[in-house]
Every structure is written in structure tokens, then in C-alpha cells.
Image: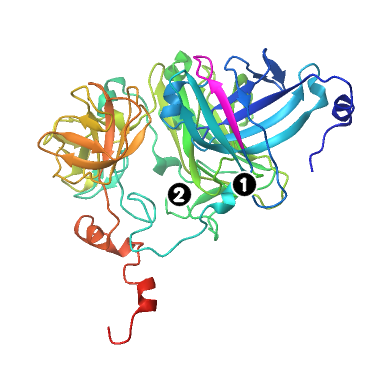
């Protein structure tokens, strides 16, 4: 049963109404879009619902049984609305959608809830229009819950339960390494000599959280990293931790220049559909000579942590702030806003990165597609070190000598020739054998296909040709960067021979199938 405010109920009983339908779309990456079918923009609760994209909807039907409620939304692709590239690249897959009606003449009347669900199949046509199916929450009941018995492994290569690390951790100053250990180092950004911070310094506690720190797991959740250390925040609660900028490698002159920003990134986990939360960063300065710190005015950033469909899975988050010239400390707050008892919002793998103005946060493209392997046992330097990324080159780093080597599982590549087919990518040969990337994943880091990841069907080392299982939205162009990772066909033999990882194999090839029930005696 839908409820409305008394003012809205009185308006509905009038001879004429001034109602319009609004959509609030929240993508998996947290980006929010607001639209209305009215011929002018509609302000509501601090947001502006745009009319520029010309949305329209089909009839809606609700049922009291468990039939799936669906609705179709159509619209036109516009530069100031839904972009064609983002639709084709899957940016709106599983986006959460709220549909409601408001009185555009008086927003104080509240809203009439029409539909809550998520995007299904998105279709585009040559005339510049698109249509998308909006699926109701009942559709989630048709999804598989729990594990099933399969001959093949249930995990994807690189998952926590798989145990294979697709790429090593970043280099850590002052850490001890042994012969054979591998690290990554952002060689393409060495000239900046920017301060960097690593998980070992701050993860999992990021200093000391003042409350809500949990180590235990339960039946609904395993830790993202596998270390079983998670920061959990309870119902309508929050926890905070502070870090001195000096401990992040910033000098007083660096801070006063105003050219640096701090990025807090990590993974978050929401249990239930009625849970949500937020992350806040405050720049702080000493409060006179008391030993306490106070927030600097207008030096705060808050980002909401939305609940996205499906629930109960780890998702990445990132929030950044320009470091105020007077700041000496950063204060991080993790909070929840839910009205239900025992609804936890959990965080893991949190890390701070300091970047200079005009720079970008480290990602795989920064590492130049090369790894460094320790040839000696020792402890790394705490000062600046310049790594030589040329294959076979040696770099002295305190008591460790590193050798630049090819990666094992995840590689960086560049398209060398414009493709003539959308399911083929041509690059320089990568230092692996034929078939190493079969059933792997290629993800584009730049170009029209940026952000798109598709499965690899075949890799030919001699020609450098990569054939994808599904076509890309656009033909790849020379200069496009991509990452590509080794593939696994999920069989026990592959797990033994290719990855030496049979102890983590999650398939059941020896469980009798249905054929065993119908066997004739003696056969």
C-alpha cells in the first residue's frame, strides 16, 4: 500500500493536478542522474531533475503475487543526458532506479512512490533513441542464492577464494622482502617524486578507529582481502580515525603549496536493501595549544555509500579532498544511515594515496606493464628510489636488488593497428604462449571502449591478435591502452597444470550426475 502526505492526497482529489514523473538513477560507480518527463527542469529535495533528455515511460503494472513487475523507459541520447558510449560500455548495467511523482508547483507535498528496481536490458537504435527495461525487486528472487555443485570451478581467476594474485602489491618503503618476491612500482610517474602511502601502514585500522572495529566474519560475509579484519559500523552510527599529514610524507612546504590532494579508497559491503552510509574527509588544524584538532571551515568532502543491486557483495569506493594549506591532519569518518537494528556497513582494504595537482591516482597503466622481482633478501630503502623499467635491468633499493621482469598473469598492452572488426584487437606480441589468455579478460583503459571488459576467446602470439568472445562497442584504434589477464577454463586439469592451485579448486568433477540415477545394473 502506497502512502502520501495529506497535502498530496488533497491535491489528487482536485479537478486538475500538476504532477510529473521523476527518475533517480544511481549507477554502480555511485554516479547519480536525475530526469523528469516534464518539459522543464524540476527541483526537488536539493536536486534538479532535468527534462533535456526527453524520457517517457510505458504503463506500469503491480501485482500482489510474485510475478515480476516491469516497466520500459525510453529516451533520446543527448550530450547533457545519457551518453551513447556509456550505454554501450555497460556503465548503466544494474543501475538502481527510483521512479516517483511530485507536484512540480509545490515540492513540499512530498512524492508518490511508483517503482523501485534496477535496470535490465538496454537497447539503442540508429535514430539516437534508447529503451531500457526497469525490473522490480521481485526479479531478484529468481537469482541463484548460495552455491551449486558443478564440474567446473565456481570461482573466477583472481577471486579471494581462488587464491591466485593477478598482480603483486605495490612497493613498500622500509619493508623486508625475500628472494623471488615481486612488487609493482609506478615507473611512469617517478619524475614527480610524489609521496605514496601503502596498505601496510594504515590497513586495516587506518590509525585507530574510535569505535566499531570488528575482526569476526559471519555466514553472510567474508573479508575482501582474506585477512579477516574488517571495520564495521552499526545502525545510525559512525567511527572516525585521524592521520597526520607528516606521516603521509608531506612536508610543511608541500602542504602550504596547496597543490596536493588525498584520496581514500577501499572496499565496502552492505548487508541489506535498507542500509546505506557515507564517508567524510575533514582537513584539520591544531586547536590552539591544547593537543586537539579542529575542522577547517569549507575543507570537508562527503560521499554517500549507496546500496546497489545486488546486495551482499564487496564494492570499491573512492573519495578525494584538496589538502588545505593550513591543514596538519586528515580526519576520516565512516557512517551509516539506516533505521533498522543490526544493519552493518563494513569496510576493508582502505588506503590513502597522496597525489599532486594535475596528477591521477595510481592504476595499472602507471606501472608500464612490468614487475620487479627481488634477487636478494633484505629491507627496502625509506628514501626515494628510481626504478629502471627496462626488462632485465637491476635496481638497488636499500638491501634489496630488484630485477625488471615480465608479469605472470596481468599485462599491459597497446593497440598498434586500427581494427576492422569489433571482436579483434591487434597489438605487439605479449611475452606469453598461445592460449595463455584464452578465457581471460581484456579491459580497455583508454579510447572509445574505455572501461569495457570482455572475455578473450583466442590469443595468437605470433601475430599479436586477440579475438574476443563478444564484440566490443567500437573498433579499437591504434594507441588504445588495455590490460589483459590470463584465462582459466575452470577445469581441474587447468588448475593443476597451468596454475598449480588445485587445493583451492572449487569444482566437483567427481560428484555423480543425473546419469548415475538411470544406470542399468551391470553397465
Residue 348: x, y in percent? 49, 45
Residue 149, image quadrant: bottom left
**Quadrant, the N terminus:** top right
**Closer to us: 246 or 489:** 489
Mark 2 Cα within 10 Å, few/some/many (few <14, many 20+)?
many
Residue 84: x, y in percent? 44, 22
Q: Secondary structure at mark 1?
A: loop
Which residue is depicted at the point 52% across and 25% down?
Answer: 328
Is residue 127 toward the left or the right of residue 338 in the image?
A: left
The residue where tag 1 is placed is: 68
Which residue is depicted at the point 57% across and 38% down?
Answer: 118
In the displayed structure, would residue 277 be above or below residue 82? below
Residue 431: x, y in percent? 14, 39
Write the start and end of the magenta stretch as one range: 71-81
Q: Is residue 189 magenta?
A: no
Task: Tell me which label, 1 or 2, sits earlier in the chain.
Answer: 1
The residue where tag 2 is placed is: 224
Residue 260, image quadrant: top left
Q: Nearer the viewer, mark 1 or mark 2?
A: 1
Which residue is depicted at the point 47% across and 30% down?
Answer: 123
Amino acid at each position: 500500500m502506497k502512502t502520501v502526505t495529506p497535502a498530496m492526497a488533497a491535491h489528487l482529489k482536485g479537478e486538475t493536478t500538476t504532477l510529473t514523473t521523476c527518475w533517480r538513477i544511481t549507477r554502480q560507480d555511485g554516479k547519480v542522474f536525475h530526469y523528469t518527463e516534464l518539459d522543464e527542469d524540476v527541483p526537488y529535495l536539493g536536486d534538479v531533475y532535468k527534462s533535456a533528455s526527453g524520457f517517457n515511460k510505458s504503463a506500469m503494472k503491480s501485482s500482489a503475487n510474485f510475478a515480476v513487475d516491469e516497466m520500459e523507459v525510453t529516451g533520446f541520447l543527448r550530450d547533457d543526458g545519457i551518453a551513447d558510449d556509456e550505454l554501450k560500455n555497460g556503465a548503466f548495467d544494474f543501475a538502481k532506479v527510483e521512479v516517483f511523482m511530485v507536484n512540480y508547483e509545490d515540492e513540499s507535498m512530498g512524492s508518490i512512490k511508483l517503482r523501485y528496481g534496477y535496470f535490465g536490458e538496454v537497447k539503442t537504435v540508429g535514430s539516437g533513441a534508447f529503451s531500457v527495461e526497469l525490473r522490480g525487486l521481485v526479479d531478484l528472487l529468481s537469482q541463484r542464492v548460495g552455491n551449486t555443485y558443478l564440474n567446473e570451478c565456481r570461482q573466477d581467476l583472481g577471486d579471494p577464494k581462488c587464491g591466485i594474485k593477478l598482480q603483486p602489491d605495490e612497493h613498500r618503503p622500509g619493508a623486508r622482502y625475500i628472494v623471488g618476491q615481486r612488487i609493482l612500482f609506478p615507473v611512469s610517474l617517478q619524475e614527480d617524486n610524489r609521496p605514496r602511502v601503502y596498505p601496510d601502514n594504515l590497513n586495516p585500522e587506518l590509525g585507530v578507529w574510535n569505535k566499531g572495529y570488528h575482526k569476526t566474519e559471519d555466514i553472510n560475509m567474508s573479508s575482501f582481502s582474506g585477512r579477516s579484519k574488517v571495520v564495521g559500523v552499526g545502525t545510525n552510527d559512525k567511527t572516525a580515525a585521524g592521520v597526520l599529514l607528516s606521516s603521509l610524507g608531506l612536508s610543511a612546504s608541500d602542504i602550504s603549496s596547496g597543490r596536493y590532494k588525498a584520496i581514500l579508497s577501499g572496499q565496502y559491503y552492505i548487508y541489506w536493501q535498507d542500509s546505506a552510509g557515507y564517508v567524510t574527509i575533514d582537513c584539520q588544524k591544531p586547536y590552539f595549544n591544547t593537543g586537539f584538532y579542529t575542522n577547517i571551515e569549507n575543507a570537508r568532502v562527503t560521499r554517500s555509500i549507496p546500496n546497489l543491486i545486488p546486495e551482499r557483495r564487496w564494492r570499491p569506493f573512492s573519495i578525494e579532498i584538496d589538502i588545505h594549506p593550513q591543514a596538519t591532519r586528515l580526519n576520516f569518518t565512516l557512517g551509516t544511515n539506516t533505521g533498522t537494528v543490526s544493519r552493518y556497513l563494513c569496510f576493508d582494504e582502505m588506503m590513502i594515496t597522496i597525489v599532486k595537482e594535475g596528477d591521477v591516482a595510481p592504476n595499472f597503466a602507471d606501472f608500464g606493464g612490468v614487475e620487479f622481482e627481488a634477487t636478494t633478501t633484505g629491507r627496502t630503502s625509506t628514501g626515494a628510489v628510481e626504478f629502471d623499467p627496462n626488462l632485465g635491468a637491476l635496481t638497488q633499493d636499500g638491501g634489496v636488488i630488484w630485477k625488471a621482469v615480465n608479469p605472470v598473469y596481468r599485462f599491459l598492452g597497446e593497440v598498434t593497428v586500427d581494427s576492422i572488426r569489433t571482436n579483434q584487437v591487434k597489438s605487439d606480441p605479449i611475452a606469453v604462449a598461445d592460449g595463455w589468455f584464452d578465457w581471460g579478460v581484456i579491459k580497455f583503459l583508454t579510447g572509445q571502449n574505455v572501461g569495457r571488459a570482455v572475455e578473450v576467446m583466442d590469443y595468437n602470439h605470433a601475430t599479436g591478435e586477440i579475438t574476443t568472445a563478444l564484440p566490443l562497442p567500437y573498433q579499437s584504434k591504434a594507441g588504445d591502452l588495455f590490460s589483459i589477464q590470463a584465462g582459466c577454463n575452470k577445469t581441474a586439469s587447468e588448475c593443476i597444470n597451468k596454475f598449480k592451485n588445485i587445493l583451492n579448486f572449487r569444482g566437483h568433477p567427481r560428484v555423480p550426475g543425473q546419469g548415475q540415477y538411470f544406470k542399468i545394473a551391470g553397465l
